[in-house]
Image (spheres, rainbow, N blue to C red):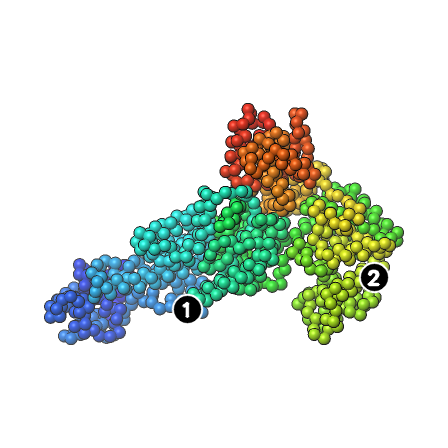
Amino acid sequence: MPELEMRLLGGLEIRLDGAALHVGQGSARLRVLLAYLALYSESWHERSELAAFLWPRTPMPNARVSLRQLLARLRRECGCAGTPWLIEPGRVGLAAGTELRLDTSRLEGEVAPREERGAPALERMRQALAAYRGPFLADVELDERDGAGRWLAERRAYYRERATALAAGVANGTRLAGDLREALAAARQAVEISFRSEQAQQALLRCLLALGDYEGAVSAYQRYAAWLRSHEGMEVPEAVTGLVRDLLQARSLLAHAPWQEQRPATAVYIQLEPAFDPEALQAQLHRLREEAEVVAARYGGFIAPGTDPYGVTLWFGYPRGDELLLVQALWAARELVAAVGGSAGVESGVTLVSGDSVQPVCGGAALTARTLAALALAGSVYLGPEAGQLAAGLLGLEAEGVRPAVAGRVAHCYRIAAGAVRLPERRAVQRYPLQGRVGERETLGHLWQAVRRGEGAEAVLVAGELGMGKSRLMAWLEEHVTGDGGGCLWAYGCARLQGTPFQPVREAVARLTGLSAEAPWTGVCRRLRRWLRPLGVSDPLAVELLAELLDTTPPPQAAIRQLGAGQRQARMQQVIGEAIQALASRRPLALILEDLQWLDGATRELLEELLAPPGVPGLLLVLTGRPEGLDTALAQRLPTLRLGALHPDSARSLAQIVAQRDGIPEPLRPLSITVCGGNPLFIEQWVKAGWRPAEGPGEAVPAGLRDILAERLDRLGRLRYTVLLAAQLGEHFTRRGLERAAAADPELWSPEGLTADLAALVETGVLAARPARGEPGYAFREPLLREFARDGLPASERRRIRAFLVQGSAGPQAAGTPADEGAAS
């Protein structure tokens, strides 16, 4: 049985029984005829059909003569090897019994079945793509207006489209598998095969974005746009533009928008699952935007303006920062993916902020989030390098897996499908040994001993900025109390759930009983009944009240349904109060409630009742809070322990412990931690960052502290702009120097306003009065806050202020000009 192998992709090549068969050299029509007979070898072809196909504009008698001559040449060139084609007087076809192998067959049909996924399907596509050596019959040129020429053009377009789809499929598959270099090579091959292909251009842009080559992505997009306009007079399809819209807008806005400041922010991109029906995709997108509006409002974010054909971008961190910025973004991503499907990407970074309503926030975090969403599996959230670092370190989240995904760095994966994983409501506290705080420990120890001796109830408020060690001090108190035979209950306020009555109590009861909202009503009531029985709570509805508090829905027959909301709250307060009194009567009890500033109103009323004379015997009540939460009536009636900066010796000791426990290889440099201003959390993050030199805007400050410092600046309101300006002058500056810098923008700052601002900043503890050379001077109390604020203005604005100062002064230190080279660079 003869074996005939024909390669039609690229130049025509024929092998008969393994030997090369050189036929049709210099004859375009003979080559087309051989390809035609090969592709349609399952049937015979009449000579009249072939004559009309090859010479459509020639009279039939003349066309048949030309065909007879062409077939005679075929017999002659095949020679003694014999021809595998059977040429009869009325018809032509492939000889019976000939085994025909065509390279085009590898591109036909469904290369990889839909049920076959992963590596096997990818390998099948690679093998099929390898068969494409070039255009169909690349060495043949015919008039494309009719007949064989038109057929040739159609087959070329068909196989070009098939090869392009295969190359793009290999690019997307290898990109998802993490091999970005092979993916980029396959994407470039797809574009080379068909530059016009929307699918090829999308694959190329996705690979360039995944590699972090943003300039390359913009250049590739611009070349495509120019080609479409010049060759076809059309604009780039929205599906392609959407991939680089953020980059294009960033370029335009960086050149024209009035940028006001730089700040940390987190971007979330939700990408819908592909839908081949345009109407179904539009319905999905509409639902996603509706859900996103609700979720963004719930977690303090906003939807980026503009349209996107495949998903939605949300920003968190503007106009107001939050220390739990990343947690809020993760909650939002989880809810949206659970509600509408698809996948999500999350990344944090320094962004530019403007007053432009078209693009109020601009930064590379959005591009990374979009790339991560494309990499993520359905139902998953992928975190970028910076967001992953924050989640794994500062927030205590653990990534389920890692893979190289963005700019050669690691993308941390947090899978929403793992429903057992619970996102934290507050920052994880690293349990390093408490350093310093000797006086505070003595005070708390004396209060506990007084309670333990039965001298009555005691209460105290521990106040301090975030990171000053309130939680560490409470951890020490818990160890001290339990080691002394007492009991300790610990509850927390939560900013996100500040409007939920008794929220800290709910969390405490859940921990004490091991119950959750997923448990059935009867099971929850059974467990609560056993827990409450020894406490002797008098209310017969105590079990149902606490079960409802744990977010368990009561059945229609539950007695609690007969009570109104006010009655439930009053009786709940009585039940909780009796339970605490019973616990304190069994053994002395320390009740710790953290984050007073986030306590709900019902919990505040409960605390007022516990503090009412004569108090609860055997109870030590300790509240912690930040300065912004100390103006309440509850806080003002309590004695207060204020935590200030650590003593330098304690700060150095803490830095040494962090370096040793976390295996920091770089030698400790004690002087470098002075920038942390004695804040324990700042010291920890500073040491863990390894004191690396800044590589970009805002990177002088460890990533784990940017959200904290941004929130602190935002709390200052209008004063934050004065802080941003003062930070350009160095850690120490004079009022005259600040007034000179403010003259660069007289509409924003006035001398009278600056005087009032400086007084307010001294009162809030941001600045300290430090006269210099006989005139009013100031210094930042927290050098790290100044480091962060220094980069709060865009580089162009910093350069403008610096130039203004240099032009108006006789020397660089004349009156508060930038004290360090980086102050306004």
Q: Is residue 205 left or right of residue 542?
A: left
Q: Does 609 sit left or right of 764 as displayed?
A: right
Residue 597, position in %: x, y?
Answer: 70, 51
Residue 400 shows up from this direction: no
**Residue at horizontal 11 percent and vertical 70 percent from the top:** 61
Q: Which of 328 and 136 is in front in this view?
A: 328
Quadrant in which the N terminus is drawn: bottom left
> Is residue 106 or residue 155 the one in the foreground?
155
* x and y percentages locating residue 724 in the rendered image: 59, 39
Name the residue that disc number 2 marks.
582
* Real-space CA distance between mark 1 and mark 2, rounded to the nearest whole angstrom: 68 Å
Q: Name the residue under label 1.
A: 113
Q: Which amino acid, by three-letter code, is at mark 1? A: Pro
SS for dot 2: helix
The foreground one among 90 and 752 is 752
> Residue 425: x, y in percent?
65, 56
